[in-house]
Amino acid sequence: MVLKVADRGRISPFMVMDVMRSANEQAQKGIHVLHLEVGQPGTGAPAGVLEAAKSALVSDRLGYTDALGVTDLRESISRHYAGTYGVDVDPDRIVATTGSSGAFVLAFLSAFDAGDRVALACPGYPAYRNILEALGVEVVGLEVEADSNFQPTPEILDRAGGAIDGLIVASPSNPTGTMVGRDELAALVRYCADRDIRFVSDEIYHGITYGVPAETALAFTADAVVVNSFSKYFSMTGWRLGWMVVPPDLTRPVECLAQNLFISPPTLSQIAAVAAFDCKDELEAHVSRYGRNRALLLDALPKAGFSRLASADGAFYLYADVGDMTNDSHAFCRRMLAETGVATTPGADFDPARGHRFVRFSFSGATDEVAEAAARLQDWLA
């Protein structure tokens, strides 16, 4: 018997998860693995979130919530926009989601039809591309370089060729950590508005910046789809909770999709996450640690031979051009893991065409582990 496997399931894997599995297999053999492959904070949820979760476990039934999320959480997110960005966002436009991944699925399903063309930067987060392809949406890869800070510009979009139905911008971005400045973001928003292009802004690394704070697309338009998450700045990856801000024309379509696809986001996570906005001191201490780790690697990696690095203005990644060392970043990362115990992610995960000569380092873990990884790499390539 031969049963059909749907084509939509034949998308590329999220390679960083495969790398993490290999690293865990090495660890099970007794090898001390240093994890610079996964973009996951090395700390757990803030103390206030844990206390709120404990209380909810005792006192709350933890049944389904509204598909758009509990009112307290949506109102807390609205206050977050007012306090952080000076932007008023109606809680009715805020949707709690099952991680940012759930938000991207809802955003893409509600905004784009099969056959539409959506542009995104390459290198960029691979799940954008893979989800869009699974939905039958054509991905228009924008090959960005250091001269545009690895971010799209109107000029680059003009060279894309053909009509575009959507643009995804991430600032700070994964894997490069680069950001779009205020004027540049405003220009991209205007470009899309003038051409009826749906603007999707990935803001999940907001709060994790080194110098200039990140700008929200909501400062320039109410028509953007904005995605954020409790995973990165709020250090709550396993709680699987994110949110999106949607324009009025997408509110009901997103709600209907959420009802049918997810019922509701995790109830315990929603209740506990309200407390996250009162944990700023703890969260800012994490960002200070990321800053120390970043400075450490910016000093140490060039000494190990990794001298061509993206600017890393935010997030917790360094994207290194290793074209002078290898033309196969997969093999290079496998060898690095086997010979040094340092796990990193090959660039092909983020850029299918040119990623064979790039490697991503995550510095979200403990500083002593980041320092040890840098020392091992210096010894390895000495």
Image: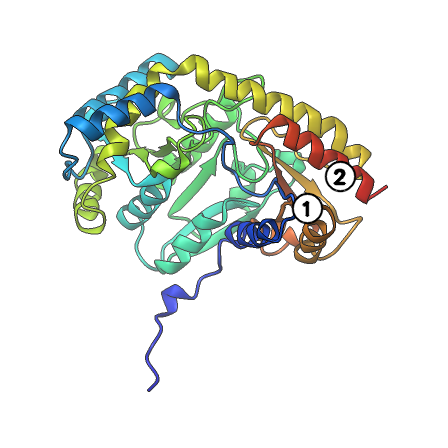
Res. 240 visible in picture:
yes
| Drawn side of residue 154 relative to residue 204, left or right | right
Which amino acid is tagged 1?
Answer: Gly
Q: Nearer the viewer, residue 199 or 174?
A: 174
Circle 1: is it few (<14), some (14-19), or many (20+) Cα within 10 Å? many
> Which residue is found at the position 27% from the left and 22% from the top?
52
Residue 101, horizontal then vertical, whole percent = 37, 44
Which residue is the site of mark 2?
376
Coloring scheme used: rainbow
> Which residue is found at the position 33% from the left and 25% from the top?
50
Res. 306 visible in picture:
no
Instruction: Name the quarter where the N terminus is drawn.
Output: bottom left
Which amino acid is tagged 2?
Answer: Arg
Residue 46, horizontal then vertical, whole percent = 39, 22
Q: CA distance from mark 2 to mark 1?
A: 8 Å
> Element at badge 2?
helix
Q: Which mark is residue 217?
A: none
> Element at badge 1?
loop
Residue 14, horizontal then vertical, whole percent = 49, 53
Residue 182, horizontal then vertical, whole percent = 49, 22
254 in relation to 12, above or below: above
**Count of all numbered marks drawn on residues in the image:** 2
User: CB atoms at circles 2 and 1 under 8 Å apart?
Assistant: yes
Q: Quadrant of residue 216?
A: top left
Which residue is the site of mark 1?
341
> Which residue is found at the position 68% from the left and 23% from the top?
295
| Drawn side of residue 370 relative to residue 86, left or right | right
